Amino acid sequence: MKQENFSSSWGFILTSAGSAIGLGNIWRFPYLCGQYGGLSFILIYLLILFFICNPLMVSEIAIGRTAKSNCVDAYKVIGEKVGYSHLKIWSFFGGWFAAVGVTLCISFYFLVAGWVLYYFLEAVSGKLMQIPHENLASEFEILTKSFSIQLSCGLIFLFVTTIIVIAGVKKGIERAGLYLMPILFVIFIILSIRSLSLDGAEKGIKFLTTLDIKYLGFSDDGFHIKPLIDTFTAALGQAFISLSLGFGVLLVYGSYFSPKENLFKAVRHIEFFDTFAAILSAVIIIPAIFAAGMPTTSGPGLTFISLPHVFQNLSGGHFWALTFYLLLILATVTSTISIFEVLTNLLIDKYNLSRFNSAIIVMCIAGFCFTMVTASFSGVLDIKILGKDLFTLADWLASTYTATIVSLTMALFVGYKAMKPIIHNIKRSAKVSDTFTRYFLITLRYVAPAGLVTLLIGAFLG
C-alpha cells in the first residue's frame, strides 16, 4: 500500500506539536510544578529536554523516516539494511512495547477526555458557575462514579477521533493540526494575560520564578539525594508524556515526513511549541490558584476542582471557564489523533488493511478497553490488578514503564547498532558536524540510558 506523507514541513511540525500539547501539558505540567517547587521543577525539566529528550526525539523521528515503516517493523527494516541479526528483540521491546503502551494510553486517555467534555458542557450550560464552592470536589467525585456519563462523553471523543483518522494523513490528521494549533495558542495567550491580570497573581509568578532548593536536595542540614531524585523522575516522566516520546507516535509521524525537510529544525520547532505551551499552562493556572488563595499542591484535581472555584470568583468567569475547557478539548483531540494513528498505521502497514478498516478495528479495540477501564474506575466492575483499578494500572504502566523501555531500546539501538543509517538520513536535509555526532553518540549510549534506568528504578522503588 502506498505510503502517505505530510504535504509540508509545517504540517509535520504542527501535527507533532499537537500530539505533544495535550492533557500532559495543560492538566499534568501545572500540578507537578505546584508539587515540586515551581522553578525547581521547570529548570530540571528544561535540562532533561535539552540533554536527554532532544537526541531521543531526533532518533525516533529519524528511525521512522529512515524505515518508512510501522513502529514494530522499523527496527527490522533498518537492521537489515546494515546487515544486523537478532532483530526480533529490538522489534519486541522497541515496537510491540510501543503498541502495547499506546493501547494502554487509549484505554484511559478517552476517560480523561470524557471529563474534559463533561466540564466543557457544564461551562456551556452555566451549571459549573452555580455549583457551591464546597460541592466542587463532590461534583467531580459524582462524575468519576458515573459509568454512563463517563462512557458516553469518552465515546463522543472516540468517534470524532476515528472520523479524523479515517480521512487520512493530509486531509484528516495534518489538516486538524494546521487548523487547531493556531486556535490553541491564541486561547493560551488570552488566558495567560487574564491570569496575570488577577489581584494576587504576583504571588504565583514569584512561585514560578523563585528557586526552591529543597526540591534539588539541599536543606539546612545538608544535601539529601531523595528530593532531587523525586523531582528528576517527575520531570523526566512528564517530559516523555509531554513530548509523546516512547509511544511510537513520533516514529509513525516521522515515516510520513519528507527526507528533504530539515529534521533538526523541525525538532526545535516541536520542542519550542511544546515547552511554550507547558509554561503557558503553568502561567494560566498557578497565578490563578494563588490569586484565589488556594494550595498549588492539589494534584490532578487542580483542573477539575480548584479551577472551577477560581472561575466562579472571576469577573466574566463563565467566559473564562468556557474558553479554558475549550482549550482542553482542542489539546485533547490533537493527542487522541496521534495515539490512535500509531495502531492504525500498524494495521495498514503490517497487515495490508485499508485505512478505513484499520481505523474501525482500532476504534473497536479502544472502545472495549476504554469501557473496561471506565467500569473498573467507576466501581461498576470490581476489577483490580496489583491492588490498582484498571485506570490507575494503565496510566502507571504506560507512562512509567512501556514508554521508558521503548525509549531505552531506541537509544541503545541507534547508539550501538544504527548510528550510520540514522546520521545518513539526517544529513540528507541538514548539516551534521563531528561535534554533534559525538554528542549524539554519547547521549544515546550513556546519558539517556542512565536517566531512563534511574526513572525505572525510581518508579519501581516508589
Image (cartoon, grey):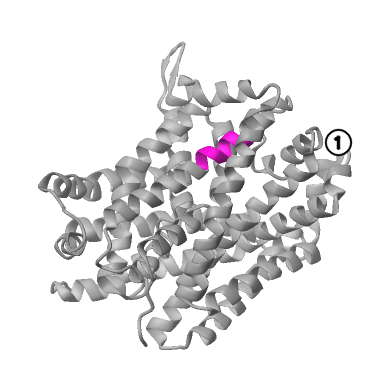
Residue hosting label 1: 134
**Magenta stretch bounds:** 278-285
- Residue 38: x, y in percent? 53, 29
Reply above or below: 224 against 239: above
The quadrant of the picture occupied by the N terminus is bottom left
Q: Position of residue 171 (x, y in %)?
A: 50, 75
Which image quadrant for residue 394?
Answer: bottom right
Q: Is residue 90 magenta?
A: no
The residue under the point 42% across, 22% down is 224
Residue 291, quarter of the rendered image: top right
The one of 28 and 2 positioned closer to us in this rendering: 2
Give the image quarter of residue 104. Answer: bottom right
Q: Residue at x 48, y 40 (%)?
A: 234
Label 1's element?
A: helix
Q: Position of residue 342 (x, y in %)?
A: 45, 70
Query: Dominant secondary structure of the magenta stretch?
Result: helix
Q: Residue 194 appears at what percent x and percent y?
A: 66, 34
Q: Nearer the viewer, residue 242 or 432?
A: 432
Residue type at mark 1 is Glu
Asked if residue 297 can be seen in this view, the reply is no
Q: Residue at x 48, y 27 (%)?
A: 39
Residue closest to the eye, 164 or 179: 179
